Amino acid sequence: MKQYKYLFLLIGLSIIGCSDLEEEPIGLLAPDGFFNNVNDIKTAANGAYGHMTHENFWGRRMSLALMLRGDMVAIGDPTTAPRRIEHDEFNVSTDNAMIDRSWLKTYQMIAAANQAIAGAEEVSVEDEIKNPVTALAYFARGFAYFHLVRQFGDIPYLDTPVTDLEAASSISKTPVEDVYENIIADFEFAKTWLPDNQAARSIPAKSAAQSYLALVYLTIGEYQKAYDEAKGVIDNEGTYNLGLEPDFQDLFDSSKIDSSSEPIFVLDFIGASNGDDGRDYQAALTGLRDDQQYGLGGGWSVGVPSLEVFNTWDERDYRKRVSLDVTGVFKITDPVTGIQTLEERPFTVFRESGAGRGVNRPHIAKYTRAIGATATGNGRGSEANYMMMRYAEVLLIAAEALNEISPGSNEAHGYINRVRARARSGNGSDFPADISGLSQDDLRTVVLEERKWELAFEFKRWYDIVRRRLGNEVFSATGLEGIKVNFDPNQDYLLPLPADELVRNPNLLPQNPGY
């Protein structure tokens, strides 16, 4: 078989997640007559969701890049792959493998969704029967493009299956504004046709589409619409079976998360061992090297919070204890007897205690502490659910958007206070206290800070930095990671378009500024 990495050839066999195509791939996925009933539409739509849990998307490639580009996580092991260090230091090359592979995988998602949407046109049943299933494909396509447009800006936009290779090979970029218009249309379709509830939160329901609409509008600065969509979710929390999980720790416990009402849309990893399909790597990437406390064999200490994250996070905040590990357990050898014992050591001596290439900083605990069975060493292939959207974020979206249209409103204060009340309940502390009477500027600062701590290490921070253009502030000498000398606001809010794509299709030029 000849391997094609060309973007537009990735439609072939995308349902089963294969990118090794024959010389003539056109029509392999959906020959005439493939789509006969609603189950066929669902099969194609399921292909899009299958790609989401691949290594090249949320398994580690895209997710790790998002984490490292924020201001809360830095490289812990300086010997890790240069492709990771480039994101942390803002000197990303156009052939960075994390970008190239996540780009291709995301377009595979889109291809599968497009096949489902096009195939639905061939199924002759009432809209009321097929549209709730087709809406899964619309949601997946909107979800994929929402990540791409925030990372790359102008991008190729495909909304139909590729049947003409020559035409596809000369497609040009679509402006950001038009991409967002299409994303909104996809989520609107999904909101209209998805049911109020699904059998699992890994299958998007109406609340997921509406929550993502709120986030899309927040991202593009249409605050009234962002508030309206978020308020629609809040007003229907009973209908949608939503609420804040009483114990913040349970959100990151694989044995409890499935029964929680807080997740709105998750990527559900199942402890898979079949290569990189369905296997996550966060426990390995963020776990403490040689740590024995969770029976995972220790992690790789790649993505580790900066010390200032620990120093500036108020000790009274229960979320800090849940989110960070400040001790590790190591095999310590007695220098006289040679006998090994397990001993707990504080983060100040992690490296000296056996962490080797690790670093003396607290490590992320959300993806190591209670992730269930794992398929391979270092915690890879866990049973963790990764929350793409949860109810606490909807409350914070509503607060942020409302503050922009009704400055300092009591209602906006109230949404933040609901999130803070749950944080207090974890340890009986009076912190974080309720807020009241803040000005628009102060409330804007508070809600962004609340997002930083509530959603810490959940791959949200970089997108917040970008949409609020916070780079010059958070990457300065007073930032959590200290000064990032390579950060350039004229360049680094966007990633480079993959070099291979530009070689294969010059119509995608120009490259993003600065690369």
Image (cartoon, rainbow, N blue to C red):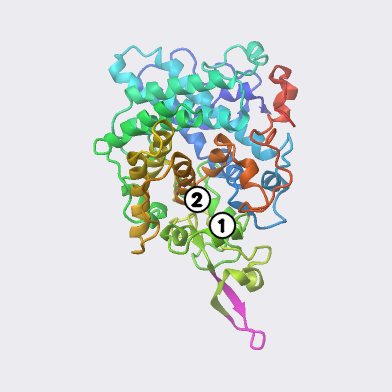
Closer-to-camera residue (155/59): 155
Where is residue 368? Give x, y as percent. 49, 58
Q: Which residue is mark 1?
A: 309
Closer-to-camera residue (274/456): 456
Q: Is residue 195 above or below residue 377?
A: above
Name the quadrant containing residue 409: top left
Tell me the quarter of the image containing the C terminus.
Answer: top right
> Magenta includes 330?
yes
Q: Residue at x 61, y 57 (%)?
A: 306
Q: For numbered disc 1, what is the local secondary structure?
A: helix
Query: Left or right of 198: which side holds 29?
Result: right
The residues colored magenta run: 328-340
Q: Which mark is residue 446?
A: none
Q: Residue at x 58, y 74 (%)?
A: 331
Closer-to-camera residue (410/13): 410
Name the quadrant containing residue 147: top right
Asked if marks 1 and 2 touch (Cβ < 8 Å), the reply is yes
Query: Left or right of 299: which side holds 181?
Result: left
In the rendered structure, which amino acid carries the disc numbered 1?
Val
Where is residue 464? Give x, y as percent. 53, 39
Q: Residues within 10 Å of mark 2 (few under 14, many from 20)?
A: many
Where is residue 240? Give x, y as percent. 28, 36
> Magenta includes 352?
no
Where is residue 326? Give x, y as percent. 53, 66
Q: Which residue is mark 2?
A: 456
Q: Is residue 379 above or below residue 197?
A: below
Q: Is residue 434 above or below residue 69?
A: below
